[in-house]
Image (cartoon, rainbow, N blue to C red):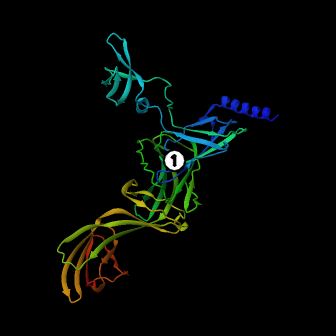
Amino acid sequence: MRNYRGLTLLCCFFAHSLLAKTITLTQNEQQDLTISLYSTDLALVQDRRLLGPLLLNDTVIVSDISQQMHPQSLQINGAGNIIEQSLNRQVLSYQSLIDTHIGKQITLAKSTPSGIDLKQQVTLLSADKNRALVEYKGSIETIWLNANQWRLIFPVGSEQLALKPSLSFKTQGRQSTGNISLNYLTSGLHWQMDYVFELNQSRDKLQLKGLASLFNNTSTAFSNASINLIAGNISLPKTGVTRAKTRELMSISQSAPGLPNAENIGDLKRYRLKQRITLLPQQQTQVPLINATDIPVETSYRYSATITPYLNNAVRKSQVDSYIAFSNNQQSGLGIALPRGQVRVFNSDTEGDFQFIGASIMRASSINQQIELSTGKAFDLSVTQRQTNNSETFDGSIIDTQFMINNSSKQRKTLRLSTRFNQHWEIISSTYPVSEKQSANAVWLLDIAANSSLVFSLKVRLKHRK
């Protein structure tokens, strides 16, 4: 009786082996797709597809996946116990055909003026777009490849080359029909935040528009995907993967942005897009994410100088830095976590049109933080700095510095002038009172009337370092 039972099990095993089949899952079987995009050329893909019962040794091929997948991160759930899984990156191309036929026989073909094709079997040794090295009747020959010379013919079906990258796996089988889940990290997908700031003519209010730019640098189309945008810094292993350049192909997905909710994911922030997005290969897609109006803003002007004990006869003339600042709080109409991003600032002119006045990088901002951005140099506000005296003392130097500040605009300006000292310092005299002191610098707030200038003189004692 035991022998019959063993024979039955053995027959079942061979029957399963004979019936083992290949099942291909395309995007037609896709039930749901969620992509979490990071800002560091990384994305988490969560792909659910419908799969029927599986037998032992059945092979499942999943097409339309990213060829830049990190195979070490792949998790396949719901398909039974996985026996093996493979990422098939090699797809049909001229170079892949060359690579897979080195040392094998191919056919050389050449058309004659009479329209007859001359064909010859040779062994391929190497090839590029211009010529090939082949072995023919015991000798190595160079064959030039172009429209008027020889061309290469490869046998169809001799190599397992797919039109698209795919994933294949085998399991111990399962009896039911249901969704399987493919979760993996991939390069080639990322996002970045782009802001547009629109200042009114008086520069005391701004409208903030935040566009999420989604990049697909892979050769795969991700259709009807639910998108998560992950903001924050994460540590990554060095994989040697470089970011490909996206073609200048852009689409804009319309939505009704307001102030999105940012959810905490560990120490990161997640923004869920309200609509599903299709990310086409080599395309940049922009999605409006944030829109806030009438944010109170302050403009300021800054100049920084370093006072040293060395003799310096140079005259330094420069335009001052222009800044805008606002608070990320509910009173200002914000009060949300703002991701890091590129900011482009526009200012309304006298006719109500907006003109570009500068760009900057805005760091990630949490709620109730003050945001300050440089927009460039102020054309009508300049500082001329010169050293007017340098005298030695027994323990250091006394330095006299003069700042001539010129305001040629029609508006009154306030300049924040700061000086940095590399030694222990003491102010002996100053034309204007100090507004702020720190360990290594001092700050003055100087009010300059329209179409006027002022002279600010400063004398300091710098002690030698011991």
Residue 319 position in % (x across, y down) = 28, 66
Q: Quadrant of the C terminus?
A: bottom left
Q: Within the image, what quadrant is residue 418 found in? A: bottom left
Residue 289 visible in the current orientation: yes
Q: Residue furthest bottom?
A: 394
247 and 74: which one is in front?
74
Q: Quadrant of the N terminus?
A: top right
Asked if residue 253 lies left or right of residue 82, the reply is left
Residue 352 position in % (x across, y down) = 40, 55
330 and 452: which one is in front?
330
> Taking 416 as reference, is 58 above or below it?
above
> Taking 372 as reference, is 185 above or below it?
above
Q: Residue furthest left?
A: 313
Residue 259 visible in the current orientation: no
Question: Which three-letter amino acid code belongs to the residue tagged 1?
Answer: His
> Taking 376 as reference, is 448 above or below it?
below
Q: Secondary structure at mark 1?
A: loop
Question: What residue sits 76% from the left and 32% below the top?
Answer: 8
The residue that disc 1 covers is 70
Residue 44 position in % (x across, y down) = 55, 50
444 and 297: which one is in front?
444
Asked if residue 131 lies left or right of residue 60, the reply is left
Residue 10 position in % (x across, y down) = 72, 33
Q: How many labels, in total?
A: 1
Mark 1 neighbour class, 10 Å CA radius: few under 14, some 14 to 19, many 20 or more: some
Asked if residue 125 lies left or right of residue 183, the reply is left
> Taking 33 as reference, is 163 above or below it?
above
Q: Within the image, what quadrant is residue 119 found in? A: top left
